Image (tube, coloured by chain):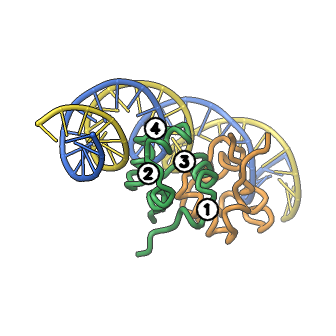
Chain colours: A green, B orange, C yellow, D blue
Amino acid sequence: MKVNNKVREMRQARHITQVKMAEDLGITRQTINAIEKGKYNPSLELAFRLLAYFDVPFEELFYIEEE
Amino acid sequence: MKVNNKVREMRQARHITQVKMAEDLGITRQTINAIEKGKYNPSLELAFRLLAYFDVPFEELFYIEEE
DNA sequence: CTTGTTTGTAAAGGTACCTTTACATGTGGA
DNA sequence: TCCACATGTAAAGGTACCTTTACAAACAAG
């Protein structure tokens, strides 16, 4: 069971760089990059911050990979 | 910023023990207990499994503590 | 060509998440 | 009383998440 996300799509749709997003969220650029590349999932707390940042419901940002 | 959950309420409303829930989910009873007691948040993957287990949307199980 | 911008990635360190094993408390029923 | 059941908790170990620091590649603008 693998969790995927649409962070990159959401970010690019808003014309925001990883750098700016990291600053806005108070986390590092590496963390955003790792999450976008699927290296690991965000913690539940960071997931909440991402939802607020993009102003989307949970289901629009995270989903289970179809198999 | 603290994430809270309603795992205990959801579980008790369904008359399920921590033991049975742990078996159903394939995790340990200690993990469920720790999450219910707020010792730590579940991973995003486990959060997904909990949503499926209780058949509720994300917002009904997890929320940000008002402060 | 040189510079700035954006993104990718790696190593090392700290904390959070989850496990296995184990012991303890409280409650209800035979 | 005795026993089964449900829950709480602790210690030790492994992996995931996130950090700081650093270097590299791709690209567009000047």
Mark 3 residue type: Ser
Marks 4 and 3 belong to one chain: yes
Marks 1 and 4 belong to one chain: yes
Residue B48 sits in quarter: bottom right
According to the picture, the residue beneath numbered tag 1 turns out to be A58
- Is tag 1's residue or tag 3's residue first in the polypeptide sequence? 3
Report crowding for label 3: few under 14, some 14 to 19, many 20 or more residues within 10 A (C-alpha).
some
Badge 1 sits on which subunit? A
According to the picture, the residue beneath numbered tag 2 turns out to be A35
According to the picture, the residue beneath numbered tag 4 turns out to be A28
- Is tag 4's residue or tag 2's residue first in the polypeptide sequence? 4
CA gap, disc 1 and disc 4: 22 Å
Q: Is residue B50 above or below residue B32?
A: below
Helix, strand or loop for disc 4: loop
- Is tag 4's residue or tag 3's residue first in the polypeptide sequence? 4
Mark 2 residue type: Ile
According to the picture, the residue beneath numbered tag 3 turns out to be A43
CA gap, disc 1 and disc 2: 15 Å
Helix, strand or loop for disc 2: helix
For the residues labelled 1 and 3, say whether their Cβ atoms are less than 8 Å apart.
Answer: no
